[in-house]
């Protein structure tokens, strides 16, 4: 097989194609490669297969939908499943986040939120509010809106930002918060940087503040206690919208349907994707408040929001999301994380503090990072553990100096035992 034609995303194409690792099947917590090797997945793929791999019920629901009503657009036409799904989802959402716009990915959900924010301010006669404030180390997808607000430098290096953007400092603080379990105690004062940016730019120019409640790809950074609430209060004082990017954190990853519920801070909009269909098929969703929806919808005659995707609310995706929701609710998976398995995960991850070169371990729900000291002599240790892990049947995410974990919510104790044993044997190979 010639691997050349497929330009792989976020991949070192030349290196991968010399030594490809190809999966053939998946089930529960494992992938199986073409060579028949199994791989314990401690990443939920890309933070998405919250229900584990290939749940049969979801596949059946998708098959049924595709035979019945394979496709129908959602522009001025509709199908029942999309309205039912929207109703179920918004009933679970906190506060008055009563409306949901369907997309096909997290990136699209983010760009949709940015555009809705602009449409909202324009509808209120404040079309000068076009500046977005995000955070250093933020990942908000890769479309042009998300790229423009991105805080991870590598993701903007090759491109020009579009639009007006500024950044709050990230909250990672090794000196004060290393080895925190749950929310770090120090750093609430970093929210005050928002007041500085408001003074700098003028509050009448700022459309929204966009944050991941727990920064994911930037290194799993749980927010300091009180930090998100402080942002909420400052936004409220200045008529600035607060958007949570919950593409990673929604659907049970932090112990509730959303991080906003878990942390008891309600944004004006939040994005989701990933766990929405547990990775079975692409789908994203942007939730917004009744105020935002009513303001935009009542400000225009005819089409109220000039935005949407050919595959918004695709029948197969709606069927998948609805089947996933059934499973999440029947098995109480949103809250499982803060009960038994979340505690076991926390203990297992922190038990690795004695590995060489570890400078921090942090976690919230089923998210964790193990950070190593920078390696002056070669590849970062996070990358080394990822690579050696693959050779020994373990999938973790290597993010430079850190190893990132986001296992499926269906994980059992035995998988944690297997994980700890495998990491320790990989560490032996690297450090002995
Ligand atoms: N926002 C966040 C917080 C994410 O972590 C991601 C994906 N990792 C995205 C947006 C983009 O999602 P997608 O890859 O589905 O476009």
Image (cartoon, helix red, strand yellow):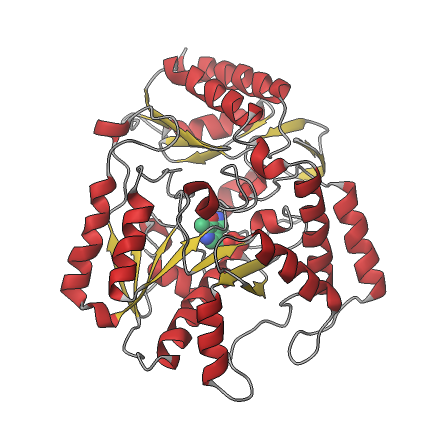
Could you say where residue 398 lies in the image, as x and y percent from the top left? 45, 34
Please name whichever residue, 371 or 240, is drawn nearer the observer in this view of the structure.
240
Residue occupying the point 34% across, 40% down: 223
Q: Is residue 241 above or below residue 74?
A: above
Q: Quadrant of residue 353?
A: top left
Q: Is residue 29 above or below residue 326?
A: above
Residue furthest top as drawn = 432
Q: Is residue 232 above or below residue 431?
A: below
Could you say where residue 354 lies in the image, as x and y percent from the top left? 38, 13
Q: Quadrant of residue 141?
A: bottom left
Could you say where residue 234 lies in the image, as x and y percent from the top left? 25, 56
Please name whichever residue, 282 or 329, is drawn nearer the observer in this view of the structure.
329
Please name whichever residue, 257 or 283, is drawn nearer the observer in this view of the structure.
257
Residue furthest front as drawn = 95
Q: Is residue 330 left or right of residue 220?
A: right
Quadrant position of the C terminus in the picture:
top left
Could you say where residue 100 lies in the image, as x and y percent from the top left? 56, 64
Residue occupying the point 41% across, 56% down: 267
Q: Is residue 82 above or below residue 383?
A: below
Q: Is residue 353 left or right of residue 392?
A: left
Q: Is residue 39 left or right of residue 400?
A: right
- The answer to whether residue 370 shows anywhere in this view is no
Q: Is residue 425 left or right of residue 140?
A: right
- The answer to whether residue 416 shows anywhere in this view is yes
How many numbered marks, from 0 up? 0
Residue furthest bottom as drawn = 301
Residue occupying the point 56% across, 88% down: 302
């Amino acid at each position: 097989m010639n691997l050349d034609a497929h330009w792989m995303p976020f991949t070192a194409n030349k290196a991968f194609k010399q030594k490809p690792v190809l999966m053939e099947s998946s089930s529960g917590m494992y992938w199986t490669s073409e060579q028949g090797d199994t791989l314990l997945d401690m990443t939920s793929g890309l933070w998405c297969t919250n229900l584990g791999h290939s749940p049969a019920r979801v596949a059946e629901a998708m098959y049924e939908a595709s035979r019945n009503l394979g496709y129908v657009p959602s522009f001025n036409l509709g199908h029942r499943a999309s309205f039912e799904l929207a109703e179920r989802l918004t009933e679970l959402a906190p506060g008055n986040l009563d409306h949901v716009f369907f997309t096909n990915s997290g990136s699209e959900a983010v760009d949709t939120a940015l555009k809705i924010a602009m449409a909202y301010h324009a509808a209120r006669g404040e079309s000068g509010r076009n500046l977005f404030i995000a955070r250093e180390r933020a990942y908000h997808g890769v479309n042009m809106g998300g790229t423009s607000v991105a805080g991870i430098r590598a993701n903007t290096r090759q491109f020009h930002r579009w639009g007006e953007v500024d950044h709050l400092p990230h909250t990672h603080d090794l000196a004060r918060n290393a080895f925190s379990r749950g929310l770090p105690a120090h750093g609430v004062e970093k929210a005050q940087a928002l007041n500085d940016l408001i003074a700098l730019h003028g509050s009448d120019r700022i459309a929204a503040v966009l944050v991941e409640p727990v920064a994911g790809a930037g290194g799993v950074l749980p927010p300091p206690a009180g930090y998100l609430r402080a942002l909420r209060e400052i936004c409220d004082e200045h008529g600035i919208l607060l958007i949570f990017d919950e593409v990673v954190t929604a659907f049970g990853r932090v112990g509730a349907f959303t991080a906003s519920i878990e942390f008891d801070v309600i944004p004006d909009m939040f994005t989701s994707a990933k766990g929405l269909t547990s990775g079975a098929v692409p789908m994203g969703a942007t939730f917004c408040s009744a105020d935002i929806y009513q303001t935009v919808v009542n400000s225009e005659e005819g089409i109220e929001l000039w935005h949407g995707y050919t595959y918004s609310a695709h029948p197969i995706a709606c069927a998948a999301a609805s089947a996933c929701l059934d499973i999440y609710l029947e098995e109480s998976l949103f809250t499982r994380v803060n009960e038994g398995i979340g505690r076991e995960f926390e203990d297992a991850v922190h038990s690795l503090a004695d590995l060489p070169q570890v400078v921090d371990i942090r976690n919230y729900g089923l998210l964790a990072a193990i950070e190593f000291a920078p390696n002056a002599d070669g590849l970062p240790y996070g990358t080394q553990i990822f690579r050696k892990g693959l050779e020994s049947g373990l999938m973790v995410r290597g993010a430079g100096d850190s190893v990132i974990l986001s296992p499926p919510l269906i994980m059992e104790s035995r998988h944690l035992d297997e994980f700890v044993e495998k990491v320790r044997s990989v560490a032996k190979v690297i450090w002995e």
